[in-house]
Image (spheres, rainbow, N blue to C red):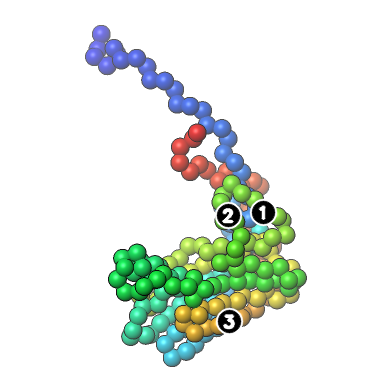
Amino acid sequence: MDFFDTFPEPAPPPERPPAPPRPKWMMPDAALPAEMAENAIIVREEGLAIAIGGLSVYPNGFDFSLHIRSRSDGDQIDPYGHRRRRDYLRNTVRPDPGDPEQNLRVGVQFADGRRAASNQSLRPLTPDQDVDPDEVVLLGGHGGGGGRAYDLTYWIHPLPPEGPVTIVISWLAQGITEVRHDFDGAAILAAAEKAVQLWDDEPPRGWVGSPQ
């Protein structure tokens, strides 16, 4: 008998229950978006520029890009206050982590009055939660940067009604109280018709961590 034949067979792994379905507010994996070109410079000052780039429109929502550029010779731009929090934890430069309202804030309002903001005081959304069908969801997506350049994306669900879709931006640390830019809701709806649904159903959202 071989050496390895003397060991008992390992127990089979525990069977996992089916993964939960993806909530309707999440950006779909089973669809290809329709692209809408946009290049609107909404802030252009001596040392700072902010532009809204293109939209990617899906059957259940859309995302848009936000491009930030600085030419300042002083401090690097810090949209989310990460450096302030880091300095606070290190107890070096600043005496406190700063007011979060000084950070970059992004909001959206539909023509029917529904709205959402990136810093809204709502429950945090996790992949196993769903929301009311009429609730507007605005979430930061992929992207990043550092120094004098940031490229960010924001996801908005659901598709808007016809009429203006207003993006609102505030960045008090940079002296920007509030700027607005309107998209055409009808154009977004028309683009959604061109999005390609690859499969009728979305893949499950998958597992995070080990099964219980």
Instruction: Say if residue 62 shows up in the picture.
Output: no
Left or right: where 75 falls relative to 127:
left
Query: Is 164 situated left or right of 1 in this image?
Result: right
Which of the 4 image quarters holds residue 169?
bottom right
Cα distance between the residues tagged 2 and 3: 26 Å
Instruction: State the residue in front, 87 or 141.
Output: 87
Q: Residue at x 43, y 91 (%)?
A: 46
- Most extreme residue toward the front, as rendered? 95
Q: Amino acid at mark 2?
A: Leu
Q: Quadrant of residue 203?
A: top right
State the residue at coordinates (33%, 84%): 74
Q: Residues within 10 Å of mark 1 (few under 14, many from 20)?
A: few
Q: Position of residue 98 (x, y in %)?
A: 44, 72
Q: Position of residue 192 (x, y in %)?
A: 67, 63
Secondary structure at badge 2 equals loop
Crowd tier of the residue under label 2, counting other residues whose Cα lies within 10 Å: few below 14, some 14–19, many 20 or above: few
Q: Tell me the residue that label 3 is attached to.
A: 178
Residue name at image x 44 percent, y 84 percent = 48
Please report contact status of discs 2 and 1: CB closer than 8 Å, yes or no. Answer: yes
The residue indicated by pointer 1 is 131
Q: Is residue 103 left or right of residue 32?
A: left
Residue kind at label 3, given as amino acid type? Glu
| Furthest residue toward bottom | 46
The residue closer to the viewer here, 100 or 135, is 100
Q: Quadrant of the N terminus?
A: top left
Kind of residue at disc 1: Val
Give coordinates of residue 60: x percent, y percent: 66, 58
Label number found at residue 125: 2
